[in-house]
Image (tube, rainbow, N blue to C red):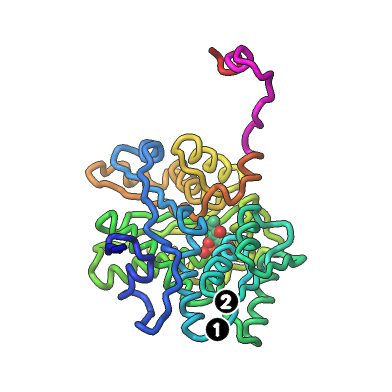
Amino acid sequence: MKITKRIWPGVIEHYRKFLPVTEKTPIITLKEGNTPLIFSYNLSKLLGKNFEVYLKYEGLNPTCSFKDRGMTMAVSKAKEAGSLAVMCASTGNTSASAAAYAARASLDCFVLIPKGAIALGKLSQALIHNAKVLAVNGNFDDALSIVREITKKFPITLVNSLNPFRIEGQKTVAFEICDVLGDAPDFQIIPVGNAGNITASWKGYKEYKKLGIIKKLPKMLGFQAAGSAPIVKNKIIKNPQTIATAIRIGNPASWKGAVMAGDESGGLIDMVTDKEIINAYKFLASKEGVFVEPASAASVAGLIKLAKSGYFTHYTLNIKQTVRIVCILTGHGLKDPDRAIKSVKAPRVIAANTRAVLKEMGY
Ligand code: AN7
């Protein structure tokens, strides 16, 4: 069978010249990346005539989150270095991605998760990909410090975003957005947990700008969950809380990177409440047809919050200028089916006859 070049090769092959790989690097890929940039009619209309809002649907990566962009790099480099095992702490998505890429690379995978605090879909992924999953009686931050200690002492590769190759891979989301739009957007809005992704995408934009591929840089707007907002509050949160379990992190590893992205770009790091997150989550699913996990809805919740507060008023006045906003939707809604079911009414049980059905349908 002839395989044509038009088949998407994954982020490493597609963006090879921007990434630290050589001909010697074994490329471990599940063809991640190339996710759709979806125009949002409703959000664009909400903001004003000259606004275009796009949703970067990262839930359509192979393990259904943005982590795959970083994991293809981290696992390829681990394999190149001769490592036999990888390890991570995770609120869920990192573990799902690490487990899948480790399986593909024939590496052992060890995962520490906070007990009882990761979504069902993510746990099922890590387990079925045959990672050794251990639930610690503590939170994500506790788990990460144990992983850091173990990977320092033993020949096991750490694949959390402290691993610089993770950041390298994840910067490709910025490249894809610019390649589609023809330049950077005016604003990029992104959920912030451990802060690797905001750090990575900002790096991507800066590299494209330096090479002259894009003319402008976006303002970076990062959103934490209000009960887990150490960067906004400028202090470590000992017992972070939020229904958006993916970003339930009290001491982000890339704290400085997030602050830098906000400051350098003229953007900000802010927070949204669980209520705002759930509203945006339901809005995306019911009005846009886009099902994301709660943490991902933090970007859209942030956009709505800023729009209401008048943050974009200045841009509304200059209607000749098209303002482009990209919200990163980091993970798929099926990751957390429990939350979806809890957020809506359960289906009514009725008699098995046409009349009863039609009555319920309102016909
Ligand atoms: C859906 O899996 O930290 O700010 O251990 O799963 O780069 O941490 C997940 C984070 C946003 C935050 N949205 O990204 C993990 C983990 C989703 C996520 C984030 C995560 P970072």
Q: Residue at x 35, y 65 (%)?
A: 9
Return the disc, 2 or 1, that comes first in the chain's sequence.
1
Q: Is residue 311 left or right of residue 140?
A: left
Q: Residue furthest front?
A: 1
Q: Residues within 10 Å of mark 1 (few under 14, many from 20)?
A: some
Q: Residue furthest right?
A: 137
Q: Residue at x 30, y 48 (%)?
A: 323
User: Residue 145 in the image: x percent, y percent?
Assistant: 67, 75
> What's the amino acid at mark 1?
Ser
**Quadrant of picture, ligand 1:** bottom right
Q: Secondary structure at mark 1?
A: loop
Instruction: Answer whether labels 2 and 1 touch (C-beta < 8 Å).
Output: yes
Q: Residue at x 57, y 60 (%)?
A: 93
Q: Nearer the viewer, residue 329 or 230?
A: 329
Q: Nearer the viewer, residue 2 or 102?
A: 2
User: Can residue 193 be seen from the camera position used here?
Assistant: no
Q: Residue at x 48, y 53 (%)?
A: 59
Q: Which mark is residue 151?
A: none
Magenta stretch containing residue 356, yes or no?
A: yes
User: Can residue 317 be seen from the camera position used here?
Assistant: yes
> What's the amino acid at mark 2?
Leu
- Whether residue 293 is situated above or below residue 162 in the rendered picture: above
Q: Is residue 135 left or right of residue 35?
A: right
Magenta-highlighted residues: 343-358
Quadrant where the image shows the N terminus: bottom left
Measured in 3D between alpha carbons, the distance from the residue under mark 2 to the one under mark 1, in whole angstroms, is: 8 Å
Q: Nearer the viewer, residue 219 or 348?
A: 348
Q: Secondary structure at mark 2?
A: loop
Give the residue pinned by disc 2. Answer: 107
The answer to which quarter of the image holds residue 44 is top left
For the stretch drawn in magenta, the main secondary structure is: loop
Give the residue pinned by disc 1. Answer: 83
